Image: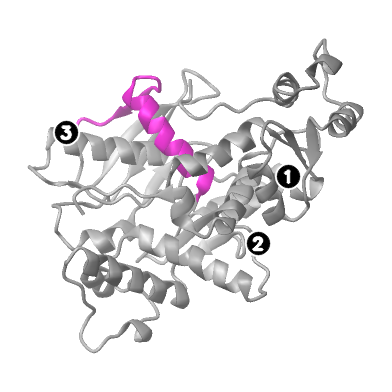
């Protein structure tokens, strides 16, 4: 078991829509193949419908599908080759950039409002105002008590404002930031959701993952994870530096941005010389990396091996809310693109569109924070 949400095949999705339909008797015995003719018949009977080519309209239609099967036009298809390029290259227009100047200023406003509500200290380096900040230095991050969620919410707010102003906005498949080493860190929605789900599965013993006996350098961890597709094959993964601090240490607000991973999982690894050179400029964060991050946080919280209260207080990887999980369930069970099921990138894109439709990050996502 992978510990992630079930993904039904095309025939299973058709069968489920039929059995939940008032017209199910017309389609018994259940079909054994998904064909264009079958889809046309299902649409005519009201068991399925054709969604819009516009991803934002399509996301709304999927939300409102009820028990019907949503058929997305091939305009929504992202081929495996294009998906690999889009994901690994962190192409502009496909990800939200959380370090742009407008996003930075909106995030600072959120962090200030959060501190005010909790009667906590908030500030900026001397002679700086929110309007004068164009990038997040360590001093700005630490004095303002910046959490990832403030930047993520601000990035969606910025995209929503630009979309309302008439700027075409491609639905984001994830987000990225540039660390102090000038390397990109990229996250996609579904890999983040799956990573947290895998953590819960690993915690229950349903995934074969082993962490080293101790943290090295007090902020890094090595682990091995068994392959999902090739049982008996194990991939080494290194994480660090991890933002391990006491609860009120302000350095944690800047250190999370320096997170690195050396991940040999094929999902995160580049192939070929050109890709290997390119990989040195960015970290693509896999679901296995996120699972191990969560396991490290749990271990520190429970075993106190680096000292009482020395823990990972901040998690930069989006966790899905029940409302967002329902949208993912639709994509995993009741949506076809043409005659096939959506791949991860296609699902990421519709989830990104839905999050914009819903008015922002916190409707579908949140980030856990301990003691912070």
Instruction: Quickly name the residue at label 2.
Output: 170
Residue that numbered label 3 is attached to? 302
Q: Is residue 90 left or right of residue 281?
A: right
Sort mark 2 into few (<14), some (14-19) or many (20+) by Cα contacts within 10 Å. some
Q: CA distance from mark 1 to mark 3?
A: 43 Å
Q: Is residue 327 above or below residue 26?
A: below
Residue at figure coordinates x 46%, y 77% from the top left: 102
User: x and y percent of residue 77 in the render?
Assistant: 75, 46
Residue 15 in the image: state x and y as whole percent. 74, 20
From what the image shows, is residue 282 above or below residue 195?
A: below
Q: Quadrant of the C terminus?
A: bottom left
Q: Residue at x 36, y 59 (%)?
A: 148
What is the secondary structure assignment of the residue under circle 2? loop
Q: Nearer the viewer, residue 89 or 339?
A: 339
Secondary structure at badge 3 equals: helix
Give whichever of discs 1 and 2 has the lower sequence position: 1
Q: Where does residue 349 sit, x and y in percent of width and height? A: 63, 50
Q: Is residue 202 left or right of residue 282?
A: left
Q: CA distance from mark 2 to mark 3?
A: 42 Å
Quickly name the residue at label 1.
79
Residue 123 falls left or right of residue 362? left
Residue 60 lies within the magenta run? no
- Magenta residues span 188-214
Q: Could you tell me how far apart the alpha carbons at marks 1 and 2 are, in whole angstroms?
A: 17 Å
Q: Quadrant of residue 334?
A: top right
Q: Is residue 156 above or below residue 269?
A: below
For this orientation, the residue located farthest to the front is 22
Q: Residues within 10 Å of mark 3 (few under 14, many from 20)?
A: few
């Amino acid at each position: 078991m992978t510990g992630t949400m079930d993904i039904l095949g095309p025939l299973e999705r058709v069968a489920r829509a039929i059995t939940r339909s008032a017209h199910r008797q017309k389609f018994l015995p259940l079909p054994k193949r998904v064909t264009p003719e079958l889809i046309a018949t299902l649409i005519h009977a009201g068991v399925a419908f054709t969604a819009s080519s516009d991803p934002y309209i399509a996301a709304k239609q999927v939300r409102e599908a009820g028990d019907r099967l949503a058929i997305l036009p091939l305009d929504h298809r992202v081929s495996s080759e294009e998906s690999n390029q889009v994901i690994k290259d962190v192409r502009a227009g496909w990800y939200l950039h959380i370090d742009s100047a407008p996003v930075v200023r909106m995030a600072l406003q959120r962090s200030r409002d959060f501190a005010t509500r909790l009667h906590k200290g908030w500030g900026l380096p001397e002679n700086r105002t929110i309007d004068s900040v164009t990038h997040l230095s360590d001093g700005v991050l630490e004095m303002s008590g910046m959490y990832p969620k403030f930047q993520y919410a601000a990035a969606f707010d910025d995209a929503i404002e630009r979309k309302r102003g008439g700027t075409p906005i491609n639905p984001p498949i994830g987000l990225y930031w540039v660390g102090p080493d000038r390397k990109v860190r990229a996250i996609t929605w579904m890999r983040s959701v799956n990573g947290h789900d895998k953590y819960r599965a690993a915690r229950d013993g349903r995934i074969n993952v082993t962490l080293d006996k101790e943290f090295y350098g007090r902020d890094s961890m090595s682990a091995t994870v068994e392959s999902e597709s090739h049982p008996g094959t194990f991939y080494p993964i290194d994480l660090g530096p991890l933002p391990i601090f006491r609860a009120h240490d302000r350095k944690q607000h800047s250190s999370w941005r320096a997170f690195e991973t050396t991940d040999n999982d094929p999902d995160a690894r580049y192939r070929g010389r050109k890709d290997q050179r390119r990989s040195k400029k960015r970290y693509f964060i896999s679901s296995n990396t996120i699972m191990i991050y969560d396991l490290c946080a749990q271990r520190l919280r429970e075993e106190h091996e680096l000292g009482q209260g020395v823990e990972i207080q901040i998690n930069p990887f989006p966790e899905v809310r029940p409302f967002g999980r329902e949208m993912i369930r639709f994509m995993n069970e009741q949506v076809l693109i043409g005659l096939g099921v959506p791949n991860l990138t296609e699902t990421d894109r519709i989830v990104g569109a839905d999050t914009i439709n819903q008015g922002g990050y916190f409707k579908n996502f949140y980030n856990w924070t301990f003691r912070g």
